[in-house]
Image: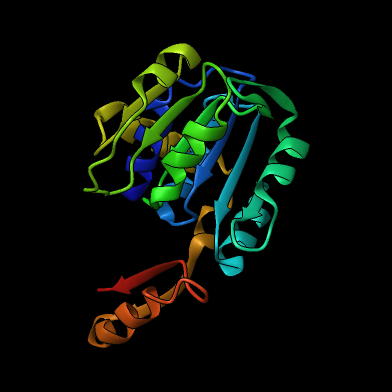
Amino acid sequence: EPFTVGCRAARRSLPQAGETAIVFGCGTIGIAAAIALKWFGVKKVMICDISDFRLNIIKNLGFSVCNMETDDYTKVTKEYFGEAHALNGLTANIDIFIDAAGAESILNRFMNSGKIGSRFVTVAVNRAIRNLDLLHITYAQKSIIGSGGYMPEDVKDVIQIMKSGRWNIESIITHEFPLEKISEAIQAASDTQNALNVVIKF
């Protein structure tokens, strides 16, 4: 189910073969979005988070990563994606931004450093009311796109992704608990530095 939500976010970005993308948030939905972007033909995908534990898991799935607390985001992204033009000068050549984390800084980063023609998809649950510089969006020809839930085509794609065997998706399950230890499971799931996907076995 969370994989279909991430797949929907990737689809909503209108990905084209050979494009580039960055995903913020290394939870299940962010990982699903990154995998779906590659499935849809995106050439380069990087995922950003602040948990090295989670980033190491996604790195083992074959993705480039950036720790937003310890890495120089501008340097890392320019080196990986190359450069392109933004309204205020050269920036990383990123076509698609996907927010699966919900931090206020992510939309700000897109507005400040997204290249001309780039697209931003928000799938994170975020009730914040934000001000947008519509003139900037107009001149930079940027798009801001919402994504929530999933549709039948996303379920079909996720089934095909999982059947393909291209990614060891089970590796994102870091803990399993029996139902009688559900309180321990919830506690483990809240520790983003030591857990990713926690499963309750009924």
Q: Residue at x 74, y 44 (%)?
A: 75
Which image quadrant is residue 87 in? top right
Q: Of 143 and 108, which appears nearest the observer?
A: 108
Q: Does residue 48 sit above or below 74 in this rendering?
A: below
- Residue nearest the viewer, comparing 128 with 52: 128
Quarter holding residue 151: top left
Residue situated in front as seen by the camera: 112 or 49: 112
Q: Where residue 22 sits in the image (x, y, percent)?
A: 56, 38
Residue 71: x %, y % from top left: 69, 57
Residue 88 against residue 64 in the figure, above or below: above
- Colouring rule applied to residues: rainbow
Instruction: Name the residue at 47% across, 73% down.
Output: 195
Tell me: 160 left or right of 8: right
**Extreme right residue here?**
79
Residue 98 is at least partly visible in this image: yes
Q: Position of residue 1 (x, y in %)?
A: 30, 48
> For this view, does 200 lie left or right of residue 97?
left
Residue 81, image x, y percentages = 71, 32
- Residue at point 63% right, 51% down? 61
